[in-house]
Amino acid sequence: MKKFLSLVLALVMTMSLVTISAGAKDFTDDSKITYKEAVDVISALDIVDGYSDGDFRPTNTLTRGAAAKIICNMILGPTTADALSASTAPFKDVPADSVFAGYITYCAKEGIISGYADGTFRPSGTLNGYAFMKMLLGALGYDSDEEGFTGPNWSINVAKLAIGIDLDDGLTEAFNGSKAVTREEACLYALNTLQATMVEYDSKTTVTVNGAQVVVGGNDAKDMENTSSKQYIKADKYMQFAEKYFTDLKLNDAGDDAFGRPCNQWKIKNDEIGKYAKAADATYTEEVKGKTVRADLGDDYDFEQVDKKDAYYVDGVQTDVGSFAVAKNNDKKIGGNGVLTEVYIIEGDDTDDTVRIVSINTYLAQVSGDYDDDDEELDIEWADDTTLSDNVDSSKVDMTLSSDDFDNLNTYEDEDYVLVTVADNEIKSIAKAEKVTAAVTAYEDGDSVTADGTKYKYSKTYNEGNGFDGDYSIKDDYDLYLDAYGYVIFADGVEDEGKYVYIDDAYAASNSEKANVKANAYFLDGTNQEITVDKVGGSSVKGETGASKVDDGWYSYTLKNDKYTLTAKADAEELSAGTVTDKDTVAIKNGTTTVAKGTSSTVFVVVDDDDDVSVYTGIKKVPEITVNSTKGDKAYISVVFEKNSSTYAKYVFIDLGDVADAKGGDKTGDVIFLYKDKYDKRGTDSDENVYYSYKAVLNGEVTKVKFDEDHGTLGMGLYTEVEYDENGYVSKYTEVTEKKYPASDVDTEDWTADEDIDSGRIEQKSGVVTINQVSYYMADGAKIMVVDDGDMKTVTAKKLASDYKAEAVYGVMNSNGEFTYLFVVTDKA
């Protein structure tokens, strides 16, 4: 007896948590199909096909005409059935040229179907379960008259026989014969028919007894024998439907799928259609105790020697079974919220029953880039807050998915959140995560969030089951992403940049052991402040003893009543002499050893020897920092790695101390060209801050830029790696003085300056400006600006060449070595 203990069984079957089915047909609405195995096999045999737009439309109802076509495809094969025709109208509402006329004529002739008393067939009418089961029973060889498929009780007789031979096996609900059959239900019934045994009757003989004719024999259906070697469905010496009509179809029901579940493997000749997990004896999508599983299995399982024979699989890898055995008094827990745990009784003889437990985690990933139409591939990456099980090695999982293995990858877009399952370090399914946008009205730390009146618990794989690290703003809207079972697997917008902090010192506020613990904290926005620490890792901290438990390093935090709860994220590492950051190798180094690699999104918090804090985003913007071992104290670096990575840095804290030299640094990416040798105005703002205003071009726009002081060296020229103070005034910059062009190793956002022009001759042709015999290749949409008698003008290349001579040239290049901006200090030609 099968016990389906989960209310989400239909959802479980709908999710492609089965396996990759490379041999099955691809339908654009695959995710809506509940009976995936049935649809895959029946469509692979061309018994039922999809629509021209690529849909299967599983919930569309089956018409009587379509049902006749299915029966003909099953008995004759699609090719022969397609050639059927009718010389005369089989029914008065089915003309001979109707698309269904041949199918209906054949089925009526074979006694499989019949019309209505008024002489009609009503081919476009819907077909209920009783009627379709009657047709399938007829295809199996059951005689309508002998089995009582006519008369007032025909539907009862049909249902009793159909259910008795398991034609309804696998339905998510009890068979309801009066309900219209859907297309996917028709596939399920048809698949069960393929595996059902054909029947035949003894020959009928008419004899005369006392002057009356009596029919002898033919009353009882008996199983049809199969003595051939092609017993590819069941090796039971009887003829299954598929063994008679689809001799190339093969079923192996003795294997396992990639997750370790007993499965059906279907093939046509040697081409696999797919592997499909069998129905479990117990199903759970939340944490469950071993003894609960034991009670649910009940008398179906012989529990002798259970500890020796249970098998437990997590994400396709067999795991130690000692602590997970299904024993009567076992309080050990398996599974978790959003973990599909299926329990199978592996039947043997009376003493050899075993239990197999299979847990399948659902993980959140995000699409990285658009679908590659040329290679037919899609790249994904793990979401930041996804916690992988010990049985998944992220370094071995291929995050590039191919359309050879997965359906409808072209329907996914960049940054979509997707649900994936993994077996033995290989992704086995992908589906879009459901998004619920709602106002949060309540939440419980590490348990649940309530939005628009619905309480959602967190998935086990979301931050180790703890959900997010911060606080929701009550009544604010959040995007909650759900797994297939309704658990929150990610809450977008909750854990933002402000939820991480670097602590470099903790101390007690007084000598009392009950004193608050204070800490020097650096936040990702560059704020440095003293904070009060309430808890670390869930434990309260007080006094010097508590302060000693707050190590230097990165923490995530929550804030309540002006007190911080910290959760450690990474350990600090002391740096020796060497390069801390190197833009050429994109490396963060401890001496000569690479600690981590930065990316375009890595956030660097840098504290200089004056305790000033700067924040940079991206390896191209952070200063190049070199540590000098001959100076006093060491510098420090602490790294928070990207989720599931030991290579790429997400957040980096760097304390330069007095031993490191920092060169450059560009927090903004701004490029400023000053076209006057002296500031235009000196002013004082409402807060009595003095500023110096220069005529400038900022990122291609003519404007005025304010500096925090007269830096003395400022004058006409190109300035990059620009930083601003709290008033918005430029406080730091790097002047471009080197001639970097032409060069063979031009980097993105490289700059050049040529301040010593000899002849000043300017030429232009086909997008190339040549100045003093140096050719500047212009990018599409490039801007050429000239300093003409103290004024800044934008000109065309043609006008530049015809009207001006060059005194100096400054340029901004892209990664191809093409100029996006060219600033030319000129004389009239």
Image (cartoon, helix red, strand yellow):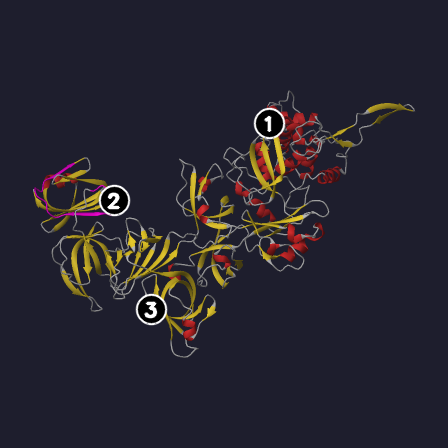
Element marked by disc 1: helix
Element marked by disc 3: strand
Q: Position of residue 625 (x, y in %)?
A: 26, 57
Question: Which of the two residues, 617 or 763, is positioned nearer the viewer here?
Answer: 617
Q: Is residue 214 above or below residue 689?
A: above
| Position of residue 207 in the picture relative to residue 733 (left or right) | right
The disc at residue 78 is: 1
Q: Is residue 657 above or below residue 80?
A: below
The disc at residue 781 is: none
Residues shaded magenta: 743-764
Q: Quadrant of residue 658?
A: bottom left
Q: Residues within 10 Å of mark 1 (few under 14, many from 20)?
A: some
Residue assigned mark 2: 814
Q: How far apart in space, not on screen, are marks 2 and 1 (Cα)?
A: 60 Å
Marked residue nearer the N-terminal end (3 or 2): 3
Q: Are marks 1 and 3 in contact (CB under 8 Å)?
A: no
Q: Residue at x 66, y 55 (%)?
A: 294
Residue assigned mark 3: 529
Q: Is residue 699 magenta?
A: no
Q: Is residue 92 visible?
A: no
Q: Identify residue type, mark 3.
A: Gln
Q: Is residue 762 magenta?
A: yes
Q: How far apart in space, not on screen, are marks 1 and 3 (Cα)?
A: 76 Å
Marked residue nearer the N-terminal end (2 or 1): 1
Q: Residues within 10 Å of mark 2 (few under 14, many from 20)?
A: some
Question: Which of the two residues, 581 or 108, is positioned nearer the viewer here?
Answer: 581
Q: How far apart in space, not on screen, are marks 3 and 2 (Cα)?
A: 39 Å
| Position of residue 382 in the picture relative to residue 423 (left or right) | left
